[in-house]
Amino acid sequence: EKYKDGLSKTRNSFTSKVNDLVARYRKVDEDFFEELEDLLLQADVGFETVMELMDQLRFEVQRQNVKDTSQIQSVISEKLVEIYESGDDSSNDLQYATEGPTVFLFVGVNGVGKTTTIGKLAHRLKQEGKTVMLAAGDTFRAGAIDQLQVWGDRVGVEVIKQAEGSDPAAVMYDAIRAAKSRQVDVLICDTAGRLQNKVNLMNELTKVHRVISREIPEAPHEVLLALDATTGQNALIQAQSFQKATNVTGIVLTKLDGTAKGGIVLAIRNKLKIPVKFVGLGEKMDDLQPFDTEKYVYGLFA
Ligand code: GDP
């Protein structure tokens, strides 16, 4: 279904290469390991994750006395899932307020698909029967407010906004007040994503975060970082700068449909220890899927 369609680029290239490797080698030996390592690196699984995986594979192959390459695919899948989920039990599910509005704060660099993701998530939550409101916190980029309004109209949710250039913290303040008084279930906040002035951006995010927590102490309930899967290892570098500015609680990996290097999902989780909560698989309203590790990894070796 949808899950498969969005990953077809990664799967087509990766799976056929792995199958080809398995067919060519038959025996698990050092040359086989080296070629497998190259394949994983090409799929953007990331150097450190690949090294960790290779160590574990060598160990497992010895322990289970795996000789035949046809047996190794399931071992690779198991180890990938293990690596992905190692080190923390943080959930891929969204966290909600026990009482009053839940606040999701979206951060990310311009162009990664943040606005589109907010629209898709609003649609998804509405379909689950929740009431949703959006806050147009990117007051910096020309057109950002209008673009969010377009999504608000499309999905049928209210957008709280001020004029371009106004203080994003003031927009958040208004939005939280509105969400409380209208008893909205979920408020999704957009933020600026300009990278030209990183220090200002990070200060702005800190301030926005502070205003939100002042109004609702446990909020934001999620700080979701949108990352573009097609930017590969660059996405990891972006994530690290956002982690310094805010307490990122989840990743939304966008445009996974547009890359054959879907291994970046594993690199992100393994390196950053932040769960990938959703993946973006297209430009339309329902092209957002909760991320399911096992489905994804086993899909790669199907
Ligand atoms: P923002 O600047 O981060 O808010 O990015 P936008 O939401 O404006 O998205 C930038 C472009 O990426 C737009 O053309 C979107 O339609 C496109 N886009 C966003 N998410 C996805 C996705 O999951 N898949 C694909 N193929 N395109 C996407």
Image: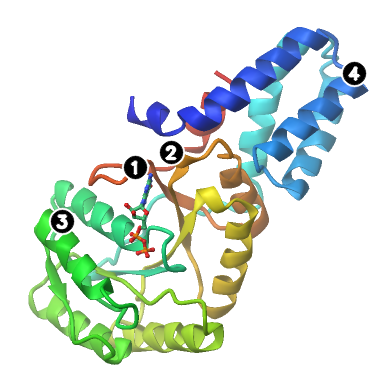
Q: Secondary structure at mark 3?
A: loop
Of marks 4 and 3, the one in the foreground: 4
Of the numbered discs 2 and 1, the one sitting upstream in the chain is 2
Which residue is denoted by mark 2 in the rendering?
257
Please state the horizontal and vertical placement of residue 119, each as a whole percent of the image.
24, 57
Please state the horizontal and vertical placement of residue 297, each as a whole percent of the image.
56, 31
* Badge 2 amino acid: Asp
Whether residue 269 appears in this view of the structure is yes
Of the numbered discs 4 and 2, the one sitting upstream in the chain is 4
Which residue is denoted by mark 4 in the rendering?
29
Please state the horizontal and vertical placement of residue 187, each as a whole percent of the image.
23, 69
Q: CA distance from mark 2 to mark 1?
A: 6 Å
Q: Residue at x 39, y 50 (%)?
A: 93
- Kindly tell me whether mark 1's CB lies below 8 Å from ligand 1: yes
* Badge 1 amino acid: Gly
Q: Residue at x 19, y 87 (%)?
A: 163
In what quadrant of the picture does the C terminus appear? top right
Which residue is denoted by mark 3 in the rendering?
130
Q: Residue at x 16, y 46 (%)?
A: 127
Residues under numbered marks 2 and 1 in contact, where contact means CB atoms less than 8 Å apart: yes
Q: Secondary structure at mark 4?
A: loop
* Badge 4 amino acid: Asp
